[in-house]
Amino acid sequence: MLMLTFLLLALGGFCQVKLAGIFGDHMVIQRSQSVPVWGWASPNESVTVKFKQQQKETVTDKNGKWRINLDPEPAGGPYEISIQGKSGIILHDVMVGEVWLCSGQSNMEFQLKSVRNADVETSTANYPEIRQIKIPLIASSTPKADIPPAKWDVCSPKTAGDFTAVGYFFAREMAKRLHVPVGLINSTWGGTMVETWISHGAFEKSPEFKSMVTSLNGKDIEPLLRDRQAHLENQIRLLEKNIKDSIPDSEWKNPDYNSQDWPKISVARGWENQHLGLEGLDGIVWYRKVIELDSSEAKGSVTLSLGKIDDNDETYINGILAGSTKGWGEKRVYHIAANIFRPGKNVIAVRVEDAGGGGGFYEDSGAVRLHTENGSISLSSDWHFRIARIANNGGAVNPNDFPSLLFNGMIYPLIPYAMRGVLWYQGEANAGRAYQYRTAFPLLINDWRQQWGEGNFPFYFVQLASFNAGNGNSENGSTWAELREAQTHTLNLTATGMAVTTDIGESNDIHPKNKQDVGLRLAAVALNNIYGKPMEYSGPVYESMFVQGNKVYLEFTHTGSGLMVRDKYGYIRGFEIAGSDHRFHYAKAFLDHNKVVVYSDEVTTPVSVRYAWSDDAGDANLYNFEDFPAVPFRTDQWKGVTDDVRYEVGKP
């Protein structure tokens, strides 16, 4: 009897009609397009889908998969969708509008709650016509049929803080200008390379990458992952060989616990970037530091600043929870209650949980400080650490370990969900292979378009912001400038557009907080190109040059109402000039109608001009009157520092 009960339960579960995980209450479906709806049920089961006045019927295949295509509908809602097989599902509060897939690495993942003026932005984010679904982080060696459970969130001050900030500001402008619902599919993973987002099939067809994937064909990556996991565990044993106790990690916050035999660690950068052998470590790590305070320092108000931590932390002072924060983009500033710190010895213990990519303290170590009524105390040195847990024991996989892992886990399960196009912000992780990005990035775009089978859907992307990555410039080479150039080359593909952000980066933060302008610049491209709202959507784009004496005259497209110089300097900055010796000199520049004239007293016969050609190009200040910054460029094709660097599986 018990066996029969189990059998009936199993058959009952098998017969339940199921929708793909991308569908759910509060979702947005694409207007004015055929809308695929799909899922699973029993083999050869009849399934009926009803939406508004439509009724579509189909029969599942031998594997239980079913799919129908709803006819195009105008914007509107809310509506219900009914799916009926041997069991039924009803989706509520479904809107019809514009759907955009937001993808890439951390600057697209960057949440609204961490932007400039975040309190105001989140408290006023009352736009129920905007919805987001966050795709769970899944790296897979084979294409996944579906995503883990996820949900569509309606934009409100309560939920908007977790939205992709770039996507939110784009959607807000779309909703205001078009008066239609906007859905955001947030499929992002910080620190990831472009190769992990491209399908295996696309690599096989690429002359540039075919040999790379051929070498992987037929290989089972699971043994490789287990070897990597074993290596990581062995490295941890070596690091912690002097630790003799077996006290559970729940006790590591206590002030009477002695952690002086723990290995040392820097708080200036994440644990994977410190030559500790911890590359690929995800999980839970404790940081501890002992400080001495005198009676005047311990009394009164005390604030603990820890900078940014990837991903989540719980911070304890003398065993007492002082604060906790979720999200790698958040600065940790904890106001400590009176009498928590005390004269003499004090213990700061920070439990860090990292879900993937990076891990640990990663801002400038100068941000790690204690602020007392007597002044500021640096906490940048003498931290110790210990690993409490390794995530995914038995073979952890980093999304950058192998190509196609995130395409398989976070893009393939979404196909063929109907959408207007893609918003993409990625490239920081590929700067070291910038020249090859000229091939890899267009490969991704063409791959996704082919996978969806919807022709050349719009694909709009963000050019890298300014950042002092390696202090690169024309003299010693700039990987970031070369990556920006590769992004500009990608505009040769149809239905692409680019938002320039060199002017809104932050020298010391790879995650600039001004995401408002990023979203608005992407929106300008879409409004002009798709939605019949003619406007300037780009800054000046270099077109041609001619030389007269020692002066170079530069001509541009997208000058809008005219060229202008915008900022405090009062003169044009960001130009360099070189002769045939390839040695660049800072150039003087001035406007001559809609041309820029560039010269240097040190270059009598100019050959090349470069503009905003450095990792940190924030000083460049050429705009059009529509307030869009000029696109960085160079007029030469001299060999760059990344020309010969190629992607190798398992290497950054």
Image (cartoon, rainbow, N blue to C red):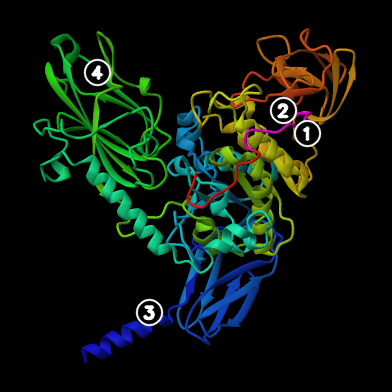
User: What amino acid is at disc 2?
Assistant: Phe
* Residue 261 drawn above or below residue 281: above
| Disc 3 target residue | 13
Q: Closer to the camera: disc 2 or disc 3?
A: 2
Can residue 174 be seen in this snapshot? no
| Residue displayed at 71% across by 14% down | 585
| Disc 2 target residue | 628
Q: Where is residue 322 drawn, in percent x and y?
A: 23, 30
The label number, if any, that marks residue 536 in the structure image: 1
Dot 4 surroundings within 10 Å: few (below 14), some, or many (20 or more)? many
Q: CA distance from mark 2 to mark 3?
A: 56 Å
Question: Which secondary structure, mark 1?
Answer: loop
Can residue 464 be seen in this snapshot? yes
Q: CA distance from mark 2 to mark 4?
A: 44 Å
Quadrant location of the N terminus?
bottom left
Given residues 59 and 207, the one toward you in this image is: 207
| First in residue order: circle 2 vs circle 3 | 3
Disc 1 vs disc 2: Cβ atoms closer than 8 Å? yes
Dot 2 surroundings within 10 Å: few (below 14), some, or many (20 or more)? many
Q: Where is residue 76 drawn, in percent x and y?
A: 64, 56
User: What amino acid is at disc 1?
Assistant: Glu
Q: CA distance from mark 4 to mark 1?
A: 50 Å
Q: CA distance from mark 3 to mark 1?
A: 55 Å
Is the magenta region chiefly helix, strand or loop? Answer: loop
